[in-house]
Image: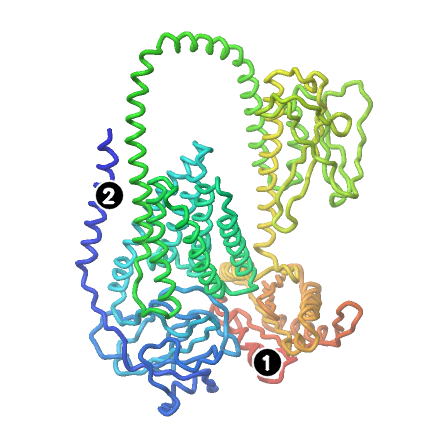
Amino acid sequence: MQMLPLLKVGSLTFLITILSFCLSQAAFAAVDIDEGWEYRWGDSPFSEDDVPQWTRADDPEQWQAIGFPSNPPDREGRDQIWYRVTLPDGQWQEPVLYIFSVDLIVQVWLDGENIYQYGTFDDQGRGRFEGWPWHAVPLPEDFGGKQVYFRIFSDYTDIGLWGEVSIMNRPDLTLFILENSLEALVIAGFSALIALLSLIFALLQNEKKSFGSIALFSLSSAVLLLSESQASQLLWDAPLVWDYLAAGSYYLLPVAMALLLEQWFSNHHPWLINLVWKIHLVYAVGAIGLALTGVVDLSSTFPPFDALLLVSLVTIAMVVIRRFRQLLIEQQVILGAYGIFCSLLVADMAVAHGFLPWWRVPVSWGTLVFSLAVVLISLWHYARTQQALHQLNLSLEQQVGERTEKAEALARLEQARVRLLTFENEKTRVLNDIIAELQDCITLNQTFSVLARRLPDLCSPLKGKLYQRVDDGRAFALLTRWGYAGEPEAPARIETPDGPPPQNLIPTLHSAGGGESGQWDGGIDNSLCLWISIQSASEGQIVMAVLFVEVPEEFARESTDYGAARLFQALSQGVQKIGIALSNIGLREELHKYSYEDGLTGLKNRRYFDQLLEHESAVALRSDQPLSLLIVDIDHFKQFNDSHGHEAGDSALKAVAGMLARHFRDSDVVCRFGGEEFVIIMAGSSANAAYDKAMELARAIRSMPIEHGATNLGRVTISVGVASWPECSESPENLLGLADRALYRAKEAGRDRVEIA
């Protein structure tokens, strides 16, 4: 039996070796672009045909030579730069320009054409961080000897290209990515397995809290390796999502290790270690939260964390060195492995910030060393456990008689508990039925009829009342009651201006670990009050209903049996699970609403428009009915915002949206396209009808005052582009582009006008 784990590890190692050998035999024909680079600070003006003038005029005196296109001298706070290089000749079948990474967004120009872009540039040539992917820039067949230009914006500490830049065939690039990522993927899978096993041990052995910390560290390491491997982009082309996963896992590494050390040094009150993991946890939550809400770019959260991590590592090292000899051997081994991992992490950090020349730091090997240390320690413990079990078996043979007698006594006690277990199973069945019926409900309002009908079965044999939240929580109305036959009616409404009635905890006498004597505060009418709460994405925790269960006198006495504890535990857990089921329904409602609705104007959003336009185009073709599309843009809206403020701008957007919603037919669909642009789909309308409707709309907007609070901000005007099928296009799919070009003409002609394609 002891050989089985070794055989499994040997088989896995053999398979990995074969796969690595196969990839290593692939010949990657690549040409590194490591010389001839030039740079130029600033951003190029664009010609009338939207081509950067710097790509057409040579101006050699304006360009400076640089060894590699990254972090030129004399940056002085500038965030825009151009690089250029002459591409070499070569024989290629499907050539691509491979770039390891770019800080932060980039456009690639060749022969006056934008052949590649990652990120969105605004009118000032700037943009937001959208991830650190690798790039495969497609090249034309005749690229040899031509200059390629890179337009880059970065408000990060680095600016420019990073890592490797080379030309290769696209199939070779895929194999190259797989070869470079194979090691990290295998080690990530191994670490994930260690995390899973540690988590299982943590759940099975609550007293061994260190398993939870090891699980967190191994899982964070696995996610970090997977997210930062280049193959992750092949699995799912969502670079920003992978960067968020990498950041979250990276930020949690010191949390996991500090938690582990705190548990090991618990007898010494390690306040410094406690402070380290709390600071890192707050930073991780705060940094990811601020990045998700758009307050900061995710890229800007890395440099402060790296500095914080260095300080934390020094702090941890000081604490560990002082007490290293007091640790067990296995703890010393794990700390040694962690030290190796941190050394590689610091080296990778130094490369990332330019303190060391670029090279692929094998951080995955540090994770592998840590995982192997955990495995070896586990095998050592397994061997010791097997030895202890062998000795225990010998002892058990001598105690068979005594244990047989005890087993018979336990059997008699178990028979006495069968009835209680049957009772518990019945409550579990009722709760499962309630959850199943709730899951069939579409809205929260539908769930209350289910609760009113089924909660009496869950609470039986106790009397109870169920109140539903009304008037936005200012009161609770009686929904149903049970067990009060012949008794006075319960209040039909409970006014709660200061919040819901206080929730009672389960009496100590009846808790799962009860047995202590004490007084039980019955609360209102000697009843147990339980909240049925949901978690709302927009409002947080909401108490949707209040359950009052009357506690009989015999349950309030100290001398109660184990069945009372079972009943109260079933009630408490059941209410929590019902709350979770209601939360899922509520969140599903909110998600359905938010996924197709613009939060500011209440109109349908871009996602809804894209789906509807595709649908209406198909309907128009099938039924041979005309289809018109209008694009509306508020004139000089940026100036309006600059003059009156963004809140006033929001008021203007709402006012225009309200006019759009009132102006068109019920069959027409008005959507917010983005920013100050709106689109209207007019099914069944000809070009002339759509044009007339747009003219009426322009007049209505022109005469509509914009108010913000009690202030009249004057009026705004709009420009409208109109396109219609079949008058303007051979296919409805082209309407959006035609309408956009018509809108551009309207703006060029002076704005406050309507143009038709």
Measuring 76% from the left and 37% from the top, which residue is drawn there?
476
Residue 368: percent from left, percent from top: 30, 49
Callouts 1 and 2 close, C-beta under 8 Å:
no
Along the line of sight, the residue nearer the viewer: 741 or 371 = 371
The residue pinned by badge 2 equals: 12
| Residue lying at the far left of the rendered structure | 25
Q: Which mark is residue 189?
A: none
> Measuring 61% from the left and 57% from the top, which residue is drawn there?
597
Which residue is labeled 1 in the image? 746
The residue type indicated by label 2 comes to Leu
**In this view, the mark in front (1 or 2):** 2
193 vs 127: above or below? above
Q: What residue sits 46% from the left and 8% below the top? A: 409
Q: Amino acid at mark 1?
A: Ala
Pick whichever, 606 or 267, lies toward us.
267
**Between marks 1 and 2, how big is the CA–CA gap?**
66 Å
Residue 184 location, x and y as percent? 31, 54
Vertical order, 257 against 451 (above or below): below
Task: Report whether 298 appears left or right of 511.
Answer: left
Q: Is residue 421 above or below residue 370?
A: above
Residue 305: percent from the left, percent from the top? 47, 60
| Left or right of residue 479: residue 171 | left
Q: Secondary structure at mark 2?
A: helix
Snapshot quadrant of residue 356: bottom left
Q: Position of residue 652 (x, y in %)?
A: 69, 70
Q: Is residue 289 left or right of residue 65?
A: right
Sequence-wise, which precedes: disc 1 or disc 2? Answer: 2
Depth order, front residue of 253/276: 276
Residue 40 placement: quadrant: bottom left
Task: State which quarter of the image contains the C terminus.
Answer: bottom right
